[in-house]
Each structure stands twice: as C-alpha cells, then as structure tokens.
Amino acid sequence: MRLQGKTAIVTGAGSGFGAGIARRFAAEGARVMVADINAGAAAAIAAETGGIACTVDVSRRDSVQAMAAAAEAAFGTPDILVNNAGITHLPAFMEDVTEADFDRVFAVNCKSVFLTAQAFVPAMKARRRGAILNMASTAGVSPRPRLNWYNASKGWMITATRAMAVELAPFGIRVNALNPVAGETPLLKSFMGEDTPETRAKFLATIPLGRFSTPDDLAAAALYLCSDEAGMVTGVAMEVDGGRCI
C-alpha cells in the first residue's frame, strides 16, 4: 500500500502502459482517475480498479480543463499526475510524414503536457507538493530510423521533464519521466509498421534482455517514482528498456 491515501490521474489509461499503471496504483492504495480518449476503455479499467472514468482528448484545452474540473469535484488536486497518453506516426521517411500526422503527434505527445501543467501545477504549487510523471521513450535517447518526428516528440518530453523539475522543485513538486522500449501495447504494430515474426525479431534483436517491455514493467517503475520512496528523485528520465540504450 505504497500509495495509501493518494490520488492520481493517469492519462491514456484505457490500455497499454497506462492501464498497467492505473491497476498498480489502485492496488497500492491510490484513488485513480482513469482518463482516456476511448470512453469505453476508460470505463472498463475504472470499473476494474474502483477508479473514476474520464473521457479526455489531451490535445485540447477544453477537454483537459474538463478533466481537471472532474478531478477537483471527485477528490481535489491530485497528488500524482501521469502524462501517459501518446501516439506515433507510422514508419516513414521524415519527408513523407504528412503535416497532419506531425501536428497530431506533437499535439498529443507534447502540447498535452503544457495543457496539463496549466491545469494542475498552480494548485500543486499552492499545496507545495505533487509528483508528475511523463511517459517519454528510448526513442528520445536512441532514435529509430523512419520514426523521426515521434523520436523528436519524445526527446522534447525528456527536456520538458528536466526543465519542469528544475522550475517546480522549490514548490515541492517532483517531475520525472520513464523511457520504455517498445512494448506489448496497442502502439507496437504502429511502431513496426507491420506485426510479423520477422519485424518482431528485428526489434527484439536491439534489446539485450531479449523481450519487449510490459505494462507491469512500467507500472513498477512508475510506482517507485511517484511514491514517497523517491522523495529525493526529480528530473530523472529512467530507462525501462532491457538495456537497449547501453
């Protein structure tokens, strides 16, 4: 019960890493708002975890503000905010990615962090505590070819995490990130372009431990960084990657 009495918002929590994090946080005693653009998925995970479902498009200010209002009504300012929602463009040469895909990747992966900061940081500052966790990627450290703009968005996430950590430390707010390697989530096929034994083998060959990351892997790391045990840890982009970035 390492999060007993805590409240948390996890975006993109209807599936994949976000669902794993929501489940683990709830198991550790937190009251969790399960936020996702897919209302049915959010409702399912919320029902499973005893949490609160919230439909949100994290790229839109009005939607993020509605999520913040719902959280305030349910449990006040969250102790923990996990910016997990993210998307990618399909593998393509950088010049062939459409402008619409570029805009969507940066709106969901980057602008969302700006919007949630505006929605939640003022109250966290006033309370002088809080933990924010951003989902970055090994792609921001060791980019894969033909995922150029996705790579760039995750590099942005790492820099934003460190900048936020420095600025918010005097207010008692910690900000960290996780850098997962490709995992068994709905985005895996999008990263690979196609899900075949050959493409899986090619991806796995770049991971020394020889397997993809799982929601449980990310949930365990998220639990540590968002718990009081990590009270002296801020500005970290922790790799959960089976050694890929070595």
Image (spheres, rainbow, N blue to C red):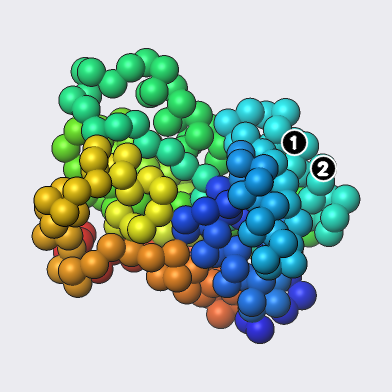
In the drawing, what numbered circle is on residue 65? 1
> Can you say which quadrant of the picture contains the N terminus?
bottom right
Q: Pinpoint residue 164: horizontal percent, then vertical percent.
A: 53, 48
Of all residues, the one furthest to the bottom in this rendering is: 1
Q: Pinpoint residue 211: horizontal percent, then vertical percent.
A: 24, 67
Give the residue drawn at x 64%, y 59%: 45
Of all residues, the one furthest to the front in this rendering is: 196
Report whether residue 203 is seen.
Answer: no
Q: Are marks 1 and 2 in contact (CB under 8 Å)?
A: yes
Residue receiving disc 2? 69
Distance in Å between CA atoms under marks 1 and 2: 6 Å
> Can you say which quadrant of the picture contains the C terminus?
bottom left
Vertically, is 105 above or below 223?
A: above
Q: Secondary structure at mark 2?
A: helix
Q: Image check: 80 left or right of 221?
A: right
Give the residue drawn at x 58%, y 52%: 14
Give the residue drawn at x 54%, y 64%: 21
Residue 245: image quadrant is bottom left
Report whether residue 50 is seen.
Answer: yes
Q: Pinpoint residue 23: horizontal percent, then vertical percent.
A: 59, 68
In the drawing, what numbered circle is on residue 202? none
Q: Pinpoint residue 97: horizontal percent, then vertical percent.
A: 28, 21
Q: Image check: 235 left or right of 125?
A: left
Vertically, is 118 above or below 179?
A: above
Which three-letter amino acid code belongs to the residue tagged 2? Ala
Which class describes the residues within 10 Å of circle 1: few (<14), some (14-19), or many (20+)?
some
Residue 175: image quadrant is bottom right
Q: Secondary structure at mark 1?
A: helix
Which class describes the residues within 10 Å of circle 2: few (<14), some (14-19), or many (20+)?
some
Which three-letter amino acid code belongs to the residue tagged 1? Gln
Give the residue drawn at x 49%, y 68%: 219
Q: Image check: 186 left or right of 116?
A: left
